Image (spheres, rainbow, N blue to C red):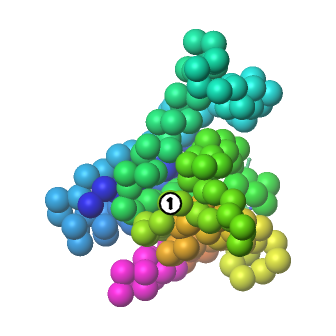
């Protein structure tokens, strides 16, 4: 089993989402002691934004790319190869300003590639990253589970599903900035979600 852990916090140290993601990985490893872990911390190795230069590189046929364009596409290729090789993917995702961190958006923009990770067919889009289990470790200062203010979960369900990843478990650590007791409760709720995901 190959586990891919993506830490999307802007913090490389002390991140709450990483703490919860680490718990998920520990659970996966205890269930699969020979599992291989690939860790990508997007705070340590930032992935570049999908800008005009990147789009120009992606839409230039491979044989016509400049060395700079080839190098830019290769950065995305590496992320795609990691996700293709993974059987289980663990995403550590803080809430920043009601959305996902730009670090995670950059990762998603890198792995979503027409003809590689999804395709359009006569009957509609088809995700090509199938057969994977995904665990999303959410960390939030407030509490939004099940409310309209939670834009993260519907977005992640949609984009992961579009890419073929439909077996997705969400683990919520909420209320982390609402005082020590609320934070403790938030982490306890995340542990309960984790236990339910592995029940
Ligand atoms: C820039 C910034 C924006 C934030 N925006 C929100 C928000 O919109 N809603 C919320 O509940 N918490 C928000 N928070 C609190 C974080 O979600 C919370 O501290 C979380 O534990 C951060 O996760 P991390 O430690 O993994 O980075 C924000 C924190 C920061 C630093």
Point 42% across, 45% down: residue: 82
* Residue nearer the viewer, 19 or 48: 48
- Kindly identify the residue that appears in the image at 22 percent across and 67 percent down: 32
Q: Position of residue 190 (x, y in %)?
A: 50, 74
Horizontal arrangement in the rendering, residue 31 relative to residue 12 (left or right): left
Q: Quadrant of the C terminus?
A: bottom left
Q: Tell which quarter ligand 1 is in.
A: bottom right
Tell me the residue at 44%/59% (across/down): 89
| Residue 107, position as x, y percentages in the image | 60, 44
Q: Which residue is mark 1?
A: 129
User: Dominant secondary structure of the magenta stretch?
Assistant: helix
Residue 138 rendering spot, x and y as whole percentages: 58, 65
Viewer can see residue 135: yes
**Label 1 crowd bin: few (<14), some (14–19), many (20+), radius 10 Å:** many
Q: SS at mark 1?
A: loop
At 77% from the left and 67% from the top, the residue drawn is 151
Occupied quadrant, residue 194: bottom left
Tell me where the magenta segment starts and ends, as one range: 187-199
Furthest toward the front, the residue is 122
> Is residue 95 visible in this depiction of the protein?
no
15 vs 138: above or below:
above
Q: Position of residue 164 (x, y in %)?
A: 56, 66
Q: Residue furthest left?
A: 34
């Amino acid at each position: 089993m190959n586990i891919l852990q993506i830490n999307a916090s802007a913090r490389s140290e002390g991140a709450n989402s990483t703490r919860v993601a680490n718990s998920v990985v520990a659970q996966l490893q205890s269930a699969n002691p020979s599992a291989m872990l690939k860790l990508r911390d997007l705070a340590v190795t930032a992935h570049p934004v999908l800008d005009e230069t990147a789009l120009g590189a992606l839409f230039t046929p491979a044989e016509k790319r400049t060395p700079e364009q080839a190098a830019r596409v290769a950065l995305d290729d590496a992320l795609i190869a990691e996700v293709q090789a993974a059987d289980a993917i663990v995403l550590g995702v803080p809430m920043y300003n009601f959305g996902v961190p730009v670090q995670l958006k950059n990762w998603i923009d890198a792995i979503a590639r027409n003809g590689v990770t999804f395709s359009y067919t006569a009957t509609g889009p088809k995700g090509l990253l199938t057969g994977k289990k995904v665990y999303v470790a959410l960390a939030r200062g407030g509490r939004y589970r099940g409310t309209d203010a939670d834009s993260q979960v519907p977005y992640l369900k949609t984009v992961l599903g579009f890419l073929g990843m439909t077996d997705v478990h969400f683990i919520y650590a909420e209320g982390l900035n609402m005082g020590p007791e609320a934070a403790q409760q938030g982490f306890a709720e995340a542990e309960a979600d984790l236990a339910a995901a592995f029940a």
